[in-house]
Amino acid sequence: MKTINTESLTIGELAKLTDVHVETIRYYQRRDLLEEPERAGGKIRRYGEADLARIKFIKSAQKLGFSLDEIAALLLLEDGTQCSAARKIAQEKLTEIHVKLAELLAMEKSLSKLLHECENKQDEMCCPIISSLQSD
């Protein structure tokens, strides 16, 4: 098995190690989430441990629901010394998640009601689901 020097990765190797596409890495660079290394001797760009760690940070933050803009703000706090600022961003995200959960629960309730009406309807002419969608 070939070992990879994580201090001298090509963009393809970095993509493979982080389980993202090469275009995703380029997108992160365009969004200033990841630095674009210089071409060593005019050849290909080489990425290192810091780039690997940064992409892992981005992916971890995405799993928690943070947007790329929010991740950019968190990356500015990456040294870990500004806990109150990070806590504020996380609290805002948690509030947003609570709102989305409430919306999803309301959707579930409405859809369950329509399904129940559909299962118990006697009139074959008018589907309660379709009727409800047409009236809203």
Image (tube, rainbow, N blue to C red):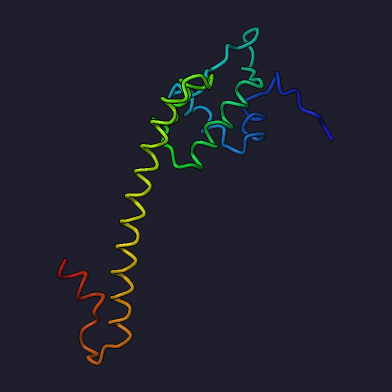
From the viewer's perspective, is 31 left or right of 129?
Answer: right
- In this view, which residue lies farthest toward the front? 84
Give the image location of residue 63, x and y in percent. 51, 42
Give the image location of residue 22, x and y in percent. 56, 32
From the viewer's perspective, is 10 left or right of 66?
Answer: right
Which image quadrant for residue 54?
top right
- Which quadrant of the figure contains the N terminus? top right
Q: Residue at x 61, y 32 (%)?
A: 15
Which image quadrant for residue 16?
top right
Q: Residue at x 21, y 69 (%)?
A: 133
- In this view, which residue lies farthest toward the left? 135
From the viewer's perspective, is 58 left or right of 128?
Answer: right
Give the image location of residue 19, x and y in percent. 62, 38
Which image quadrant for residue 32?
top left
Depth check, front residue: 45 or 98: 98
- Which quadrant of the figure contains the C terminus? bottom left
Q: How many marks?
A: 0
Depth check, front residue: 20 or 57: 57
Q: Is residue 69 above or below residue 47?
A: below
- In this view, which residue lies farthest toward the bottom? 122
Give the image location of residue 90, x and y in percent. 42, 35
Q: Is residue 109 above or below residue 15?
A: below
Q: Residue at x 65, y 7 (%)?
A: 41
From the viewer's perspective, is 119 left or right of 63?
Answer: left
Q: Is residue 115 above or below residue 88?
A: below
Q: Residue at x 54, y 37 (%)?
A: 60
Q: Is residue 51 above or below residue 116?
A: above
- In this view, which residue lies farthest toward the right? 1
